[in-house]
Image (spheres, rainbow, N blue to C red):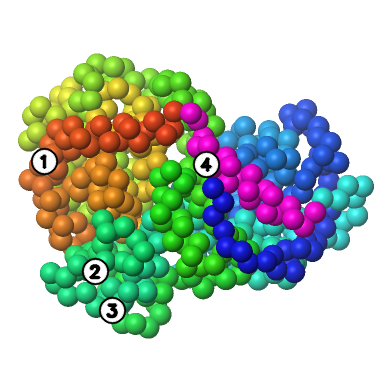
Amino acid sequence: MILHSKNKLPNIFLKPKLREITCINTRTKKAINMEEIMGEILVVPFFGQGHVFPLTELCKKLSSFRFKTTLIISSDISSSVSSTLLLHPLVSVAAVDAPLPPPPKPGKFDPQPLMLHCKQLRQGMESILRSCRSVKNKFAISVVCAIVDAMMLSHIEDIFTTFQVPIVGFFPCGAACLAMDYAAWKTDVEYINPGETRFLPELPNEMAMDYVDIVRRYSSLEEAFGSEISRTKTKSFPTQPGDEPPWVEEVKVTVAILVNTFVELEQTFLEYLVKQTGLPIWGVGPMLPEKFWTLTASKSLLRDRDIRTNFSHKTNYSEDEVLNWLDSKSPSSIIYIAFGSDVVPTLEEHEEIAKALEESSRQNFIWVISKNQDYYPNGLETQVGKRGLIINGWAPQLLILSHSSTGGFLTHCGWNSTMEAIGQGVPLLAWPIRGDQFYNAKLIVCYLKIGHMVSSIGENIGLKRVKKEEIIQGVQRLMEDKQVHNRVKDLSHKYRHGFPISSAATLHDFKDFIMQAK
């Protein structure tokens, strides 16, 4: 299925500049025939894990069409790039000296470190483009486009415009959160009253918004970025509920958009975005490692160490130790609890989780606590004995989700984790904390119906503190709901043939689109 508008290609796209490069053949990198290369694509991710990983996988996918791709990243994260990518004959990694900003402190957002990072990254990219334009080599490869993470568009789009390189926007999230963002703006949802439900035109009724949706999203932003955020119609950062989403203006410099999802999951939302933006839009995901797809298709156990190489494994349990513990438990008996490395519940809510796990005397669990968190549930391991495993640091998430003993996943609803869980047929207990996570949770619970909210009291999630009683009831509700388990199992069958057929087809469509310049 082709999802795009009938807009003609702009002149800038029809006449891309030639970029001259040097082909370096080493003992570790296979020689390539430059005459067979279709063109070069520059790829620029945002620096977060959830942004870098999908775009590294996209580089590999594009190489199957004989495109050479250059991944431009900060030197601070170059060590996290997998060895398989570094050895790929059609993929280059350009590491720019642009130190990463520190994680934001709760209640205070200082944009200056991020601005400095983007400025240094800009300077590095300009140097790369200028040097490539000036060097005269035997081989010349046409730069057909730059694929830029949506969070980087406003910072660097003018560089590519200056060098006459067409820009393609990439969203590492799903289509539903973008559609909801847009529809919320168009329908002035910030004026919803308590008790009112606002249906969003052209979107499923299950995605209707109410007062709680607005208040809790606003509350989460205030908690994360500070009380200076005011609830007005003026433009601000971060965006308030009902504001025009920043990406609406930012994607106007792009010739197309790629979204990290697939048609079978979010066709309605993809079609809505095409209609509203007037841009060609393709669902090309989920961008997960190739071994994820092959092993999932064969119903094999996934081993993170074999799938995600070159990744820092600072942890108190090895992958083998986790596997031995999983093997000791009965099928579908474990609730897996893991949040993002930076987006986590409050310290008070961590205490509530610990109390809930201690009092749930028959519930097996794995609880992952990031090294970035200033918290550890001292004494809990002694209280729960062998029915609980507390991982401090990195956890082999793919192993845990693919193991038959795992029966549920308490998650912040980050998109990559959501896609991994669906692929393994694991239902979700949604605890969104900020940003697109609330829309992802609504997609999971209300539209796909493959999970529950952690609290049945909606306003407690993101507005008030979630208490132990709600966590206990939420886990029990999820683990005992056979309909939810059956639905997510049915949905996981879409992963059983490997990388989605629809996404493979849309990648072909995208290839044809950008090669119209040839």
- In front: label 1 or label 2: 2
Distance in Å between CA atoms under marks 1 and 2: 31 Å
In x, y percent, where is residue 92?
A: 70, 43
Alpha-carbon span between mark 3 and mark 2 = 19 Å
Residue under the point 27% across and 41% down = 450
Q: Nearer the viewer, residue 136 or 235?
A: 235
Verify CB contact (< 8 Å) between mark 4 and mark 1. Answer: no
For image coordinates 29% across by 50% down, the residue present is 447
Q: Which residues are magenta?
A: 497-518
Residue holding disc 1? 472
- Tell me where residue 347 appears, x and y as whole percent: 21, 52
The front one of 345 and 13 is 13
Helix, strand or loop at mark 2:
strand
Residue indicated by mark 2? 198
Tell me the residue at 26%/62% (across/down): 208
Q: What SS does tag 4 mark?
A: helix
- Closer to the chain start, of discs 1 and 3, is 3
**Label 2 vs 4, first from the N-terminus:** 2
Q: Are marks 3 and 4 in contact (CB under 8 Å)?
A: no
Q: Residues within 10 Å of mark 4 (few under 14, many from 20)?
A: some
Q: Give the percent coordinates (x, y) of residue 241.
A: 31, 71
The residue type indicated by label 4 comes to Ser
Magenta region's main secondary structure? helix
Q: Earlier in the sequence, mark 3 or mark 4?
A: 3
Residue kind at label 1, given as amino acid type? Ile
Determine the image quadrant of residue 155: bottom right
What kind of residue is marked 2?
A: Arg
Quadrant housing residue 358: top left
**Foreground residue among 87 and 450:** 450
